[in-house]
Image: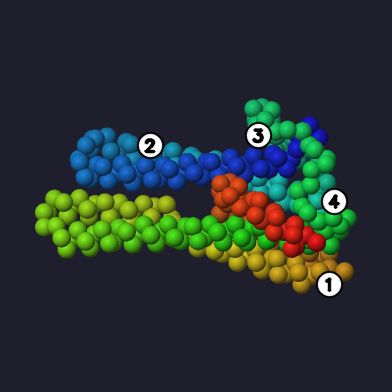
Amino acid sequence: MAHDPRKLCRRYLTLAKRWWAAVLLCKACLIVFSAVIISFSVFSKFAPFVALAVTLSSEFCQARSDKAKSIGELLLRKLDYLDAFGWQISKAELSDVFVEAGAKFRKQTPAKNDDEHYFASQHPIGTRRALENIQESAWWTKHLAHKMFWYLLASTVTTTVLAVVLLIVTVGTISDFKVLAGVGRVVMAVVMLIVSLGLARLTNSYYQASQMSQRAERRATELMGDDDNEVEVIKLYCEYHLNRAIAPLIPNRIWKWNRETLNELWNEYRAA
């Protein structure tokens, strides 16, 4: 192929993560701007217009992120079925995806390398290879989502505790009303930021994604002993990818931090 669909899939998912980061940035800027307006009463006349602009920007970025994610997840499903069962991706399907990508996106996507292997399984196309592939994919997702859960949980709890401690210490030691009011605004801005970014809900989503992947990995292991199980394997693939599609994205930075360790552990203990 003139372009590698696997790399195209990665590019779409990376693009979705960047737009998602832009959404979070817009929400954070809106909270900071609101705190500045409340604290210093500057730019109060322009506050509604700025808030509207930032809100519309956030919605635009969210729409772009959702679009890129949907295309990336679609390609991911088709590529996994291709690697496991040999279900070919038609040129018509790829052409539709490339039309959405644009000329610059196509130029930056390299040609397909037939020597590159995405999964570690050495079995031929069939149910055994499919189960090993989903085991590997679910194992990676399980650990990466679990790490994101702990990172977000620690960040949310630490930020909340520090804000509450700051408020308690200030109330107990400072009697100046202006200072107390300023600290109260800061604490309220922190709480609003946590709620606006949906950190608590996002933390739970990563936990659920980790648990979902663990169940998929366990189910794949159970199906290993049955040779006549193609229908069950396809059902497992459908359920796994459906859950993957609604799960939050894993930041590239988290993947890069853990890539070498997880690859080494998988090849040493699981691939054999």
Q: Amino acid at mark 4?
A: Gly
Q: Residue at x 72, y 51 (%)?
A: 77
Q: Amino acid at mark 3?
A: Ala
Q: Secondary structure at mark 1?
A: loop
Spatial CA distance of label 3 from label 1 is 42 Å
Spatial CA distance of label 2 from label 4 is 48 Å
Contact check, label 2 and label 4, Cβ < 8 Å: no
Please state the horizontal and vertical placement of residue 76, each as a whole percent of the image: 70, 49
Q: Nearer the viewer, mark 2 or mark 4?
A: 4
Q: Residue at x 27, y 46 (%)?
A: 35
The residue nearer to you, when weighing 240 against 52, is 240
Q: Residue at x 44, y 60 (%)?
A: 154
Q: Amino acid at mark 2?
A: Ala
> Which comes before the other along the chain, label 3 or label 1?
3
Q: Is residue 237 visible?
A: no
Q: Which label sits on residue 101? A: 3
Spatial CA distance of label 4 from label 1 is 22 Å
Q: Secondary structure at mark 3?
A: helix
Left or right for 182, reference 247: left
Number of numbered discs present? 4
Q: Residues within 10 Å of mark 3 (few under 14, many from 20)?
A: some
Residue under numbered circle 2: 53
Q: Amino acid at mark 1?
A: Gly
Spatial CA distance of label 2 from label 1 is 57 Å
> Which comes before the other along the chain, label 3 or label 4?
4
Q: Secondary structure at mark 2?
A: helix
Residue under numbered circle 1: 225
Q: Nearer the viewer, mark 2 or mark 1?
A: 1
